Image (tube, helix red, strand yellow):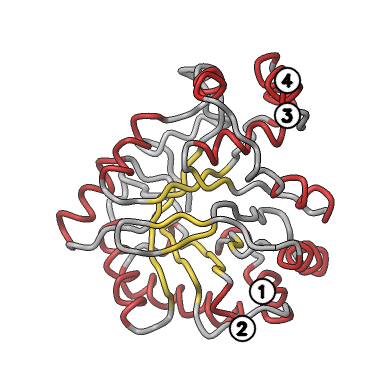
Amino acid sequence: MGFPSLTAGDGTVLPAIGLGTYKLNGEAGVEAVGHAIRAGYRLIDSAVNYENEGAVGRAARSADVSPDELVVTSKLPGRRHRYAEALATIQESVYRSGLDRIGLYLIHWPNPKVDLYVEAWSALIEARKRGLVRHIGVSNFLPEHVDRLVAETGVAPVVNQIEIHPYFPQPEVLDHHRAHGLLVQAWSPLGRRSELLQDPTIAEIARVHGISPVQAVLAWHVARQVIPLPKASSAERQRENANIFSIDLDDAEIEAITALGRPDGRTGGQDPAVYEEF
């Protein structure tokens, strides 16, 4: 089954849901990603720091799907922001995956105190020119970081992958990115899963629609034109997560879920203005 898609300002088309793969490693990771591809997922999220590019690539190569239909994602770690190191790391990602090229490559975190993210972005631009990657973007960037990339290189990311869930909805960032043609992907789209899914507001909306609380939250993302990346290892959970595109939340329900946002809503307190990951 095919999933709907969203289109960035430059015409890049991405599926409206993807599979998160953090901690899906080795043979179990290959199996889980394989399930997802068979269930219709075409956007598979990975990263150098997840240490599973090999598993994701093996599942992608084994799938009965054209490589051009899949968007395998990886991300550049903070320790590799210098231009030459970044370019070599991207090459290694391609080699590890066994694919001809990576579908989408992101800078994992801006690490603004180190202040090499523009240099890293220049390496991603070059990697795209060389055909190592199809599309390039960023992750955990604030609007000011995105604006600086565009100002200094003239090239905008097609996507920013950030923390978004009902307790941290980030409406101002969404508005900025929509205005500039960036697509937004949500990592941790279910937040602190057990806490969020027991929220009375979400439980009631799920009850009204005859769906699970997970599906209610994912349908909220879709309604806001955010691409959720829920992680799921079981085929059953993957199918449940993807069975959301016929759910029609009304404006009041969307606003009620968004209103759950909290000033301290981040799951790990990882503010990109100060947080660093290498």
Label 1 with label 2: CB-CB less than 8 Å: yes
Figure check: 131 above or below 229? below
x%, y% of residue 132?
A: 43, 80
N-term-proximal mark, 3 vs 2: 2
Give the amino acid at mark 1. Answer: Gly
N-term-proximal mark, 4 vs 1: 1
Label 3 with label 2: CB-CB less than 8 Å: no
Side of 68 where 109 appears, left or right: left
Give the amino acid at mark 2. Answer: Gly
Q: Which residue is mark 2?
A: 98
* Residue 35 image label: none
Question: In the rendered image, which quarter is residue 47 located in?
Answer: bottom right
Q: Which residue is mark 1?
A: 54
Q: Which residue is mark 4?
A: 203
x%, y% of residue 254?
A: 53, 25
N-term-proximal mark, 1 vs 3: 1
Task: For mark 2, give the secondary structure.
Answer: loop
Q: Residues within 10 Å of mark 1 (few under 14, many from 20)?
A: many
Q: Which residue is mark 3?
A: 213
Kindly report which numbered mark, 4 or 1, lies closer to the viewer in this rendering: 4
Task: For mark 1, give the secondary structure.
Answer: helix
Question: In the rendered image, which quarter is residue 167 located in?
Answer: top right
Q: Residues within 10 Å of mark 4 (few under 14, many from 20)?
A: some
x%, y% of residue 137?
A: 38, 59
N-term-proximal mark, 4 vs 2: 2
Distance from disc 4 to disc 2, alpha carbons, whole Å, reads 43 Å
Give the amino acid at mark 4. Answer: Ala
Distance from disc 1 to disc 2, alpha carbons, whole Å, reads 7 Å
N-term-proximal mark, 3 vs 4: 4
